[in-house]
Image (spheres, rainbow, N blue to C red):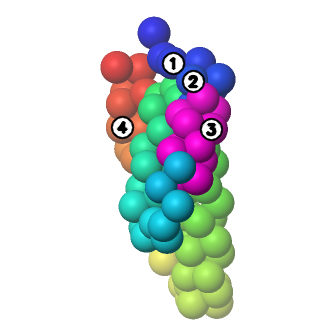
Amino acid sequence: MPAPISAGLLSLSSAIIFTRQLKCPVKLTVLAKFLSRAYLRAMSKPMLAGMIGIIGFLLYVAVVIILADHVLGTHWTVEFVYFALAGIVWVWPAKALIIWAAR
């Protein structure tokens, strides 16, 4: 069972209290690593997979649109093959992401 988000916030507050008690400058990278790990531990895999999937799909669509400018105007079979492949290729990374999130 994934840890609730409140556990991540508790880790965040304890990190802030800990750094205040040190009374010396703490390297930002150390604090950032701690906070990112605490936050990722609080996030569930399906939520993380959803965020990665949406961002990845938007990036994929942007790349397909940019490459489509080079394909448009060529022979219709080249356009057909390009758009058929571009419409199907995203399925395999999405499938792997869904399987990872379900484990």
Residue 75 vertical placement versus 64 (above, below): below
> What residue did someone put label 4 on?
96
Q: CA distance from mark 4 to mark 3?
A: 35 Å
Residue shown at the point (63%, 33%) measured from the top left: 9
Q: CA distance from mark 3 to mark 2?
A: 10 Å
Residue 8 vertical placement versus 62 (above, below): above
> What residue did someone put label 1 on?
3
- Lateral position of residue 74 relative to residue 65, left or right: left
Choose the circle earlier in sequence order: 1 or 3: 1
Q: Where does the image place residue 21, in percent across and percent down from the top left?
A: 53, 49
Helix, strand or loop under label 4: helix
**Res. 5 image quadrant:** top right
Q: Mark yes or no: residue 94 visible.
A: no
Q: Mark 1 touching mark 3, by CB under 8 A?
A: no
**Res. 96 image quadrant:** top left
> What residue did someone put label 2 on?
7
| Magenta span | 9-20
**Please, what is the three-letter code of the amino acid marked with disc 4?**
Ala
> What residue did someone put label 3 on?
13
CA neighbours of label 2 inside 10 A, class few (<14), some (14 to 19), many (20+): some
